[in-house]
Amino acid sequence: MSDVKPFVLDFDLVSGFCTSGKVKPTQRRVSDMVAQFANETAARAMVEGGDPLLYEFYGLDLPEDDSGVLQFGTTILYPGKVGEEYFMTKGHFHTILDTSEIYYGLSGHGMMLMETPEGQVDWKEIGPGEALYVPGRWAHRSINTGTEPLVMFFVYRGDAGHDYGTIEEKGYRKLVVERDGKPAVIDNPKWKV
Ligand SMILES: O=P(O)(O)OC[C@H]1O[C@](O)(CO)[C@@H](O)[C@@H]1O
Ligand SMILES: [Fe+2]
C-alpha cells in the first residue's frame, strides 16, 4: 500500500484547468499522432502550418503500481478537424486489460469510441452532466464533435497502465468524421487485422 496523504485539488468546471497551478498538464499535438489520422497528408500539412494543440490532460503524480490508488484528472480536448476527422485523443487499452474507467462530462460535446480486442465496437455521446462508464477490456478514444473544448473528468484504477502499442499498430476499427455538418461513424480504411 502506498503512503498517499489526503489532499484536495481544484478543477475549473468549464475550462477543466487545475486553477491552483499545482499540477501541469501534458499536451499532445497533431505531430504526436500523425499516423493515427485517416488523412495523414492533411495531418502533415497542419504540422507544417503550426502544429495545433489537440488536447491536454492532468495526470497526477500518484503511484502507478498500487491497485488501491485511484488516478484522476481532467482532459481538455480542443475542437477542430484533420481533413474530415474530428480532433481526438490517441486512445488506448489499459495494460491491465480488465480495468474500467469513468468519465464525467463537464463542458463541450463529444463522443467516446470504444472497441474490444475481439472486435466489438461501440460509441457513446458525452456532454455536461453525463457520466460514461468504459468497462474493462474496452479501448477508449475521446472525440470532440462540437465547437467548444470537450472537458471531462476521469478516474481509473491506479495500476491500470496505458497500452498505446496495439492502437498505434492496428488503428481503430471505426472513425468519427463530419458528414453534411454532422458526426458520422464510418469504417477506418487504414485498420489492420
Ligand atoms: O492517454 P490518451 O489516449 O492520450 O488520452 C488521454 C486521456 O486518457 C487518460 O489516459 C485516461 O484514460 C488520461 O490520462 C488522459 O486524459
Ligand atoms: Fe484509460
Image (cartoon, rainbow, N blue to C red):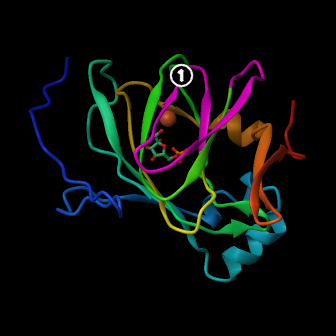
Question: Which of the two residues, 78 or 25, is positioned nearer the viewer here?
Answer: 78
**Horizontal side of residue 85 vs 3, given as left or right:** right
Q: Which residue occupies 83% across, 69% down?
A: 41
Query: Is 69 drawn above or below residue 73 in the view shown?
Result: above
Q: Is residue 147 visible?
A: yes
Q: Amino acid at mark 1?
A: Pro
Q: Residue, x 75% and y 60% (percent of image)? A: 182
Range of magenta residues: 116-141
Is residue 52 positioned above or below 26 on the image? below
Which residue in the structure is indicated by mark 1? Answer: 135
| Percent x, y of residue 21 | 21, 63
Image quadrant where residue 138 sits: top right
Q: Tell whether position 128 is magenta.
A: yes
Q: Residues within 10 Å of mark 1 (few under 14, many from 20)?
A: some
Q: Which sits in the foreground, 86 or 13?
A: 13
Q: Where does residue 132 sit, x and y in percent of width and height?
A: 49, 34
The local secondary structure at tag 1 comes to loop
Is residue 185 shown left or right of residue 111?
right
**109 lies above or below 99:** below
Toward which corner of the image does residue 12 lie, by quadrant?
Answer: bottom left
Numbered circles on residues, count? 1
What quarter of the picture does the C terminus occupy? top right
In the image, is residue 113 part of the stretch drawn in magenta? no
